[in-house]
Image (tube, grey):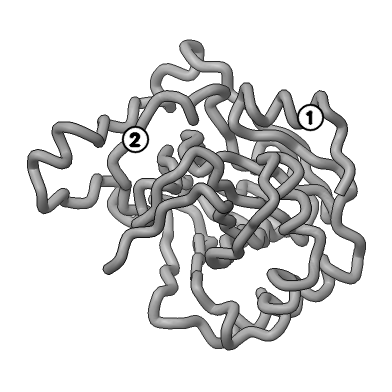
Amino acid sequence: MKIDPKLIDEYEQNGAVLLKDVFDPFWIDLVHDGIEKILADPSCYSEKLKGKTGDGHYFDDYCNWQRIEEFKKFALESPAAAIVGTLTKSKEVAFYHEHVLVKEPGTDKETPWHHDQSYYPIDGEKVCSIWMPVDPVPRDTCVQFIAGSHKWGWFEPIKFETERPYQIIDNECEEKIYQKVPDVAANKDKYNILSWDVQPGDCIVFHMKTLHGAPGNASRVNWRRVFSSRWLVHSTIVSEL
């Protein structure tokens, strides 16, 4: 996979980068079909959340690639692994899992600011996510990133439903590792926040320590269906559970 070296530098500096036209329509249609299957038959891991006033729901579900053939085919055969290898300069890449993120029309439920790596028993400085929509996503609905925040260390994981942190069982671990997620919404002028207009075929690749959040979907007609895949590389440490 050839990627402009300037985009690789941008990824390393900011912890997130937009890649244009890297997935052809075959992959978009395939993933779209898989998402429809998940919406019709969600797993026990799924959530369907509402905001305060909107009519629409925020739906997410994950770790279904072994039962949804479309997701498995994407993980094993699409250009995604090559994209990760090129951006992270890694010769060995492993698929970790997928995450479906759907905001129906009229969804005012926002995605709270967080980073992904704290949710998983993994460590490493090159693990990343590929955020790939199957619908056009305008900037005002797109996920947002704080540039450079992948270099800030670890932040406590946040529950999406309550937007409150998970309880850390080991208090010493909490003091040594996890920081409180900053109140980005109230202090946006303090941060360099990245976001883009994203079309089907495009994707955003971001470091799993990059702080990010997303607005609701104010459109009354347009869906925001996203397939996010998470990737490990040769230097990743995975804890035994």
In the image, 202: left or right of 103? right
Q: Position of residue 46 (x, y in %)?
A: 44, 73
Indicate the amino acid at tag 1: Leu
**Outermost residue toward the left in this view:** 171
Earlier residue among tags 1 and 2: 1
At x 80%, y 66%, the residue is: 78
Tell me if residue 99 can be seen: no
**Figure check: 52 above or below 73:** above
In the image, 16: left or right of 210? right
**Figure check: 76 above or below 95:** below
Q: Position of residue 226 (x, y in %)?
A: 66, 59
- Identify which residue, 94 or 100, lies in the foreground: 94
Give residue 7's mark.
1
At x 50%, y 60%, the residue is: 58
Give the quarter of the image for residue 12: top right
Q: Residues within 10 Å of mark 1 (few under 14, many from 20)?
A: some
Tell me if residue 118 can be seen: yes
Q: Position of residue 90 (x, y in %)?
A: 67, 46
Residue designated by label 2:
154
Identify the secondary structure beneath mark 1. Answer: helix
Identify the secondary structure beneath mark 2. Answer: strand
Q: Is there CB contact under 8 Å for labels 1 and 2?
A: no
